[in-house]
């Protein structure tokens, strides 16, 4: 059903509430809206009550027409169902037929008038609309075939009517990839249906006490056909029922089944769940092994891969392998484990793949079909059992704005009204107050909090102005909060100015501006969409203000959720420390009853009984109980495992009302909530801060809405002024992410394949059959078409005097390359910073699309030398930005130059968002030629992006906030360009900057020679002189001819690049890498010249939890012989990944010397790899072995308590335990390696080291086991 829309031609006639009609309804202080459908002639009346009058206001919906098919088609009649309604001012009432959730009013729909019509309410723009759609059980599609590849078919509809598109339709799409050799007559169709329309009518292996959804029915029918199937559906849709049916089939048919999950914790949870359903279930995770020979064994994917390499006897009689969360195959580090496991599975095994929604599920099925020469089905549904509504909450606001309704419609007006709240004084934008109906759900019953839009924040240390804060700062109102950024700063361009930008004067840092990259550790840069200032680092002003504002907003939102019975709520944050901070902020809220408190305390007491007495008094355990008793929980990877599992259990039982969690909670078992809140749209992905992808948002938001309990799920996204419309639509409405291969070669894989006795598989086979190669081959036809199109475009471009133009372009390219090399030397901080005073005229950009032309320096800001400086602002659009990646920045990249640059006026869309006072509506600033209309804005520019430094300076006003002040600077720059039509005079690096190095002087002379040659060239003379904006003046024909040549050269270069891509297939690339890695193994003696694995290589074959090559080198050079078991355990902790610590003291001599030997060996191996033509950063490789937990492990091994070792580091307790458990797994593999090569003494030493670790809370049993 659809509500009335403009597409059916509605008429609106507003009647005053004081009219005769108002007498019927009573005084409600609002308007009556009459709507008529031109197509049916039917009409209905809606009276909306606002909180402008009495708080207890009502509205009634009267429909004066019959429930006819015409009315149904016209979308005026929603279906019927009783639901619970909450008012906008905190009132609640059970009503007969439907309700709405609007701006501050309790909406009541009169039951008797709607008895024939069903329920429904068309609310105001901000309302939660209680309109359902008829369940459509159709499942339909199309059929395709290709003679060269597996045929792909879609099923015919299960019921007439085809597949609906509404989110409430129980539709599914069934596709199947069919190999050419498939025998369609193998199964009787009256029992199993057809290959493209499976319908199983035989006896079921398992019955359910509920009616299966269409996608579940189709999936089960595929399983009964004994064929592999990929099930892609949203969280909570019911994928688990399909997996359980596969397990039930194995029990029925006296076969075995393996259930794999990506994480140990998820394996424990799934073991518990399956053990309650089935009798013979085992578990293998590396930490624990329970009934490994059971009928159904739950294990991590790494365990399965190891069993496949070793040819484990446990794999005999296995008929089914279930891969849960198969979309994890996209993981950069671990995704290859899934690919290898799938490739190595015996052909007789069938597979069940469970995944979140994918945009290329059919492509994955095609790969499985080609790999195994058997059909692979895809059952896909975007049906959500509980529809979602997506709201925005503006930072410091007092209401929610419905951005996307349950039909998936983006509410443009509501978005604009939400963004206008950031500029309450804007002359051209609507003012947002608590009493106005402008698309928001009012929070007027809560404390109001208005943010300061003009607070100061500095980014690191000011070079030419006032000193900055001690730790962090930078950015400001625009970006995401501070938090722990990555090491170093990324590169990028000034791409976004936040709305409400406050222009700092000389000596002050720019704020609320966007920049792709930026930031050091502690300066978590934010800003998505239109960019935005990065929050300050820990302790910085920017971070403190942003954090305080966010905490207050969280408090308001959670209180509203509780008041309106919208709990339980999951509050997602991308920072573990923020999760705890926000939870503690709610410590004064009490969300549970007395009985619930007693139950929580009892469950808590039973859970911690498994711990030693000394561990029960840990601060982490004692401090969490008061919070839990109030119904507030925290869930992230840094928690003690026992607490994390306890909180999961309490949440499942409904005892936790508000849970603050990181995104890992969105994986695994079904733990939905009624409401989900996102504290930020920005996240750190290991390389930098970026906006959430649509796939990530879909996964997390899918936790909202409990099937059978909630009529709809509510998602609330906390946003700031950088949340531009493009980002909003991409994130909220974007398609699920495709499954992209991350296949890569490892020494572990190569050695294991070389050591296989059967010779069935080798590295070449794995490469050729990888999903990576399959995707590459599928893309080739499209690449060929692109090449043809580019070549055709290039051939159609006419050029006169082509040889002359080509010579001129070659000279220009040489000049550009030499100038770039020269500027890299000029921009070394020790050489240029003293010349970048306020007022200095500089040119920013690369001469292309990112060229901003001439601007004026306002200030130079440096990051803290220890990497704790303020974060650069986030990038715009979906790309994000913020604190730079893990790569080490250059010296120049550590400095930001706040520069006045000429920006194009905001577009009409941005202007219409109610922006004033210099704001840009979240739009990314765009460069504007100086001779065109625009406005100067202060943008942060990374020092390497400075293209030229002029010898000229202009006067910069102290206060750049007034537009007149910036306009004066613009006039001054334009005056200089008129005064120097041939170009502004540059600082001479030799004579002015006194750079006298001989190689540099030679480079400068080369640049000058090329510059003269270019300027005297005939093509250059015909182009004419430069204009004010740097564009061409006279010689228009010559300029157009050169432009045509450049365009053709660009097209030819693109075509050549694509041709190279076609010639150098992924198979070719991986072959080269395989040869290089084989040379490394030969030089290290792990294989001989014939490729036969040697003793050292056999030891490396069993190590997949750490760097197998480095460890075996240390083993075989006698390194471990002189160490005791405590030192061995401590040293091996360097091989275990762990979060970075800010507290790294000086190591004792017993540990420092072995660490130095390890790092020397790592440098030797990295150097060998580089010499063998592998891309390796030697320093980065060496630094990857950090001694973060060496002291912790050393003292734990010697008997220290857990409380004592926790005091030695700032690493989270849960991270310590996870690292030590991983260390124990490494030591276990080293024992196996020693046994394989006959090193019995060393085997005993590793066993002793492991035994000394395995005690206390570090190895406490899981609550799920």
Image: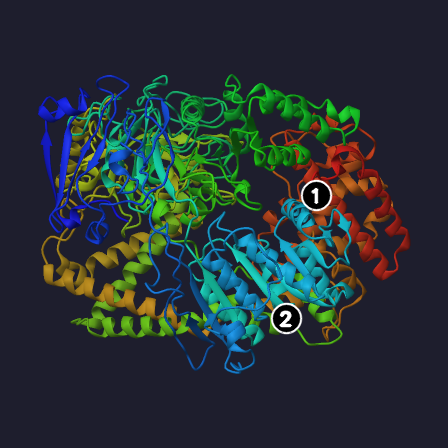
Q: Residue 614: percent from the left, percent from the top?
A: 78, 24
Q: Residue 899: percent from the left, percent from the top?
A: 29, 34
Marks 1/2 in contact by CB < 8 Å: the verdict is: no
State which quadrant residue 1090 falls in: bottom right
Front in this rendered view, residue 79 or 913: 79
Residue 972 against residue 237 in the figure, above or below: above
For the point 24% across and 63% down, which residue is it? 1046
Q: Residues within 10 Å of mark 2 (few under 14, many from 20)?
A: some
Q: Residue 611: percent from the left, percent from the top?
A: 76, 30
Q: Residues within 10 Å of mark 1 (few under 14, many from 20)?
A: many
Residue that extends furthest to the right in the rendered view of this protein: 1241
Residue 534 in view here: yes
Q: Is residue 1095 left or right of residue 980?
A: right
Front in this rendered view, residue 692 or 1138: 692
Residue 855 against residue 67 in the figure, above or below: above
Q: Is residue 509 left or right of residue 110?
A: right
State which quadrant residue 1132 falls in: top right
Is tag 1's residue or tag 2's residue first in the polypeptide sequence? Answer: 2
For the point 22% across and 38% down, which residue is it? 413
Residue designated by label 1: 1134
State which quadrant residue 401 falls in: top left
Q: Residue 327: percent from the left, percent from the top?
A: 52, 55
Label 1 element class: helix
Residue designated by label 2: 763
Front in this rendered view, residue 1008 or 598: 598
């Amino acid at each position: 059903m659809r509500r009335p829309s403009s597409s059916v031609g509605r008429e609106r006639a507003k009647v005053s509430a004081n009219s005769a009609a108002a007498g019927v309804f009573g005084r409600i202080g609002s308007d009556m809206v009459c709507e008529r459908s031109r197509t049916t002639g039917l009409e209905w009346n809606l009276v909306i009550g606002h909180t402008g009058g009495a708080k207890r206001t009502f509205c009634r919906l009267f429909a004066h027409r019959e429930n006819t098919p015409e009315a149904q088609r016209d979308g005026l009649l929603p279906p019927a169902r009783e639901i619970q309604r909450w008012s906008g001012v905190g009132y609640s009432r059970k009503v007969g037929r439907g309700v709405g959730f609007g701006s501050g009013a309790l909406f009541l729909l009169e039951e008797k008038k709607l008895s024939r019509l069903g329920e429904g309410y068309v609310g105001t723009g901000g309302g939660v609309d209680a309109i359902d759609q008829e369940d459509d059980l159709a499942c339909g599609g199309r059929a395709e075939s290709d003679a060269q590849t597996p045929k792909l078919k879609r099923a015919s509809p299960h019921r007439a009517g085809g597949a609906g598109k509404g989110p409430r339709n129980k539709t599914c799409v069934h596709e199947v990839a069919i190999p050419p050799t498939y025998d369609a007559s193998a199964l009787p169709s009256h029992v199993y249906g057809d290959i493209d329309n499976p319908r199983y009518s035989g006896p079921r292996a398992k019955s359910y006490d509920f009616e299966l959804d269409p996608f579940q029915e189709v999936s089960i029918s595929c399983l009964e056909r004994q064929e592999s199937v990929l099930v892609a559906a949203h969280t909570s849709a019911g994928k688990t029922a399909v997996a359980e049916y596969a397990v039930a089939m194995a029990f029925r048919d006296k076969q075995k089944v393996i259930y794999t999950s990506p994480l140990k914790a998820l394996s424990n949870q799934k073991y518990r769940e399956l053990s309650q359903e089935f009798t013979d279930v085992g578990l293998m995770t590396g930490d624990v092994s329970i009934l490994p020979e059971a009928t159904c064994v739950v294990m991590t994917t790494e365990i399965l891969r190891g069993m496949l390499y070793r040819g484990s006897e446990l794999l005999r009689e296995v008929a089914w392998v279930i891969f849960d969360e198969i979309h994890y195959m996209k993981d950069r580090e671990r995704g290859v484990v899934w690919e290898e496991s799938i490739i190595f599975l015996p052909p007789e095994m069938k597979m069940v793949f469970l995944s979140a929604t994918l945009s290329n599920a059919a492509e994955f099925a095609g790969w499985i079909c080609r790999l195994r020469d058997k059909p692979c089905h895809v059952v896909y549904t975007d049906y959500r059992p509980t529809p979602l509504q997506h709201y925005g909450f503006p930072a410091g606001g007092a209401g929610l704005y419905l951005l996307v309704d349950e039909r998936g419609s983006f509410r443009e007006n509501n978005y604009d009204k939400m963004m206008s709240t950031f500029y309450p004084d804007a002359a051209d934008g609507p003012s947002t107050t608590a009493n106005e109906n402008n698309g928001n759900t009012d929070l007027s019953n809560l404390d109001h909090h208005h943010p300061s839009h003009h607070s100061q924040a500095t980014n690191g240390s000011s070079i030419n102005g006032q000193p900055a804060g001690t730790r962090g700062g930078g950015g400001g109102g625009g970006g995401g909060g501070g938090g722990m950024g990555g090491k170093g700063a990324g590169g990028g361009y000034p791409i976004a100015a936040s709305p409400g930008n406050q222009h700092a004067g000389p000596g002050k840092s720019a704020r609320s501006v966007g920049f792709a990259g930026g930031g050091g550790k502690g300066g978590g840069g934010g800003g998505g969409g239109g960019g935005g200032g990065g929050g300050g680092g820990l302790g910085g002003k920017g971070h403190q203000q942003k954090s305080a504002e966010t905490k207050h907003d969280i408090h308001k939102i959670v209180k509203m959720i509780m008041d309106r019975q919208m709990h339980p709520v999951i509050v997602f944050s991308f920072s573990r420390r923020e999760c705890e901070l926000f939870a503690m902020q709610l410590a004064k809220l009490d969300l549970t009853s007395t009985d619930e408190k007693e139950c929580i305390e009892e469950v808590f007491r039973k859970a911690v009984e498994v711990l030693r007495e000394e561990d029960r008094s840990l601060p982490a355990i004692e401090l969490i109980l008061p919070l839990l008793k109030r119904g507030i929980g925290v869930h992230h990877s840094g928690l003690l495992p026992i607490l994390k599992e306890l909180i999961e259990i309490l949440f499942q039982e409904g005892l936790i009302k508000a849970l603050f969690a990181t995104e890992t909670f969105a994986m695994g078992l079904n733990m939905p909530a009624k409401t989900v809140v996102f504290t930020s749209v920005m996240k750190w992905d290991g390389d930098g801060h970026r906006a959430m992808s649509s796939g990530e948002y879909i996964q997390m938001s899918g936790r909202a809405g409990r099937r059978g309990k909630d009529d709809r799920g509510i998602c609330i996204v906390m946003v700031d002024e950088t949340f531009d419309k493009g980002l909003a639509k991409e994130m909220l409405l974007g398609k699920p992410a495709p499954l992209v291969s991350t296949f890569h070669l490892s020494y572990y894989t190569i050695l294991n394949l070389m050591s296989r006795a059967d010779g069935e598989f080798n590295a070449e086979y794995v490469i050729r059959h990888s999903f990576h190669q399959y995707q590459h081959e599928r893309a080739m036809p499209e690449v060929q078409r692109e090449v043809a199109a580019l070549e055709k475009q290039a051939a159609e471009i006419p050029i006169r005097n082509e040889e002359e133009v080509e010579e001129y372009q070659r000279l220009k390219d040489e000049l550009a390359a030499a100038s770039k090399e020269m500027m890299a030397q000029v921009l070394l901080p020790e050489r240029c910073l003293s010349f970048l005073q306020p007022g200095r005229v500089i040119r920013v950009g690369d001469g292309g699309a990112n060229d901003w032309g001439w601007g004026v320096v306002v200030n130079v800001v440096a990051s803290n030398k220890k990497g704790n400086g303020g974060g650069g602002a986030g990038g715009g659009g979906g790309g994000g930005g913020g604190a730079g990646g893990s790569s080490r920045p250059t010296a120049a990249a550590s400095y930001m130059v706040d520069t006045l640059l000429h920006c194009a006026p905001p577009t009409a869309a941005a202007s219409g968002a109610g922006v004033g006072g210099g704001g840009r509506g979240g739009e990314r600033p765009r460069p504007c030629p100086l001779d065109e209309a625009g406005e100067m804005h202060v943008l942060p520019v990374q020092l390497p992006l400075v293209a030229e430094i002029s010898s000229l300076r202009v006067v910069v006003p102290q206060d750049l906030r007034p537009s007149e002040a910036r306009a004066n600077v613009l006039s001054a720059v334009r005056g200089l360009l008129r005064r120097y039509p041939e170009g502004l005079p540059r600082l001479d690096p030799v004579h002015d900057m006194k750079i006298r190095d001989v190689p540099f002087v030679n480079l400068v002379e080369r640049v000058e020679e090329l510059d003269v040659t270019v300027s005297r060239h005939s093509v250059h003379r015909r182009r004419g002189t430069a204009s004010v904006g740097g564009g061409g003046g006279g010689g228009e024909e010559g300029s157009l001819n050169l432009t045509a040549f450049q365009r053709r050269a660009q097209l030819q270069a693109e075509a050549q690049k694509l041709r190279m891509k076609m010639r150098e297939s992924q198979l070719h690339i991986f072959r080269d890498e395989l040869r290089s890695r084989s040379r490394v193994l030969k030089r290290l003696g792990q294989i001989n010249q014939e490729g036969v694995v040697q003793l050292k290589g056999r030891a490396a074959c069993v190590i997949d939890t750490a760097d197998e090559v480095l460890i075996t080198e240390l083993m075989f050079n006698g390194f471990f012989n002189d160490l005791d078991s405590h030192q061995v355990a401590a040293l091996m902790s360097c091989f275990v990944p762990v979060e970075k610590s800010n507290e790294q003291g000086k190591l004792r001599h017993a540990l420092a010397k072995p660490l130095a030997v390890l790092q020397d060996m790592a440098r030797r191996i990295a150097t060998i790899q580089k010499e063998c033509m592998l891309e390796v950063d030697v320093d980065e490789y060496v630094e990857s072995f950090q001694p973060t937990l060496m002291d912790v492990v050393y003292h734990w091994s010697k008997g220290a308590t857990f409380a004592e070792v926790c005091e030695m580091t700032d690493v989270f307790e849960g991270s310590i335990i996870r690292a030590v458990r991983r260390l124990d797994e490494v030591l276990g593999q080293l024992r196996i390696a020693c046994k394989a090569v006959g090193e019995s003494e060393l085997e005993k030493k590793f066993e002793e080291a492991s035994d000394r670790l395995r005690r206390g809370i570090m190895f406490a049993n899981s609550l799920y086991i």
